[in-house]
Amino acid sequence: TTYNIDAGGLTLSAPVDLYPNITAFVSRFYQQCLGRSADSAGLADWVTNLSTGKQSGANVAYGFIFSPEFTAKNVSNDTYVKILYRAFFNRDPDPTGYANWMNQLNAGVSRRSVLSGFVNSDEFRNLCGAYGITPGTL
């Protein structure tokens, strides 16, 4: 049966539509770090900067963790480490790694230094690779 309907077409031009893997990567950080869905303007900025090579996965990691929104949460060291594991390794902490990071934080090592340990790891590079993101370094 013919309904005489023109299927039409759709041309995708927004970076969030053109780069679904990068969009998924950034959306993870909104959920894992900020506990919310991405806002369209922020998502578009991050995806554009990652897709053009202007920024790397390390830049995104730093940008989320040291954003005013995240720092205002004033999370405990325990919560901080658990968020880093989920956001940057896509898993819950293993007991040995968790104890190591907690010992470092409790001994006065900066959160930036701990973040650097996560971002400069093979595990984060592998996560970035799975999404087609350049990992970068801190």
Image (cartoon, rainbow, N blue to C red):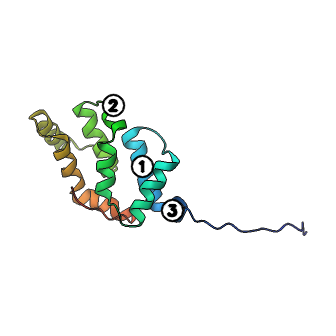
Query: Can the viewer see residue 92 in this picture?
Result: no
Disc 3 target residue: 15
> Could you say where residue 99 lies in the image, as x and y percent from the top left?
16, 39
Is disc 2 surrounded by few (<14), some (14 to 19) or many (20+) residues within 10 Å?
few
At 26% from the left edge and 57% from the top edge, which residue is drawn? 123
Disc 1 target residue: 28
At 42% from the left edge and 65% from the top edge, which residue is drawn? 51
Is disc 1 surrounded by few (<14), some (14 to 19) or many (20+) residues within 10 Å?
many
Q: Amino acid at mark 3?
A: Pro
Q: Amino acid at mark 1?
A: Arg
Q: Amino acid at mark 2?
A: Lys
> Could you say where residue 138 lies in the image, as x and y percent from the top left?
21, 55
> Who is closer to the viewer here, 22 or 99?
22
> Could you say where residue 128 lies in the image, as x and y percent from the top left?
34, 61
Query: Can the viewer see residue 61 in this picture?
Result: yes
First-in-chain label (2 vs 1): 1
Does the CB distance between marks 3 and 2 fall below 8 Å? no
Disc 2 target residue: 73
Q: Could you say whether the residue bearing mark 2 is in a helix, strand or loop?
A: loop
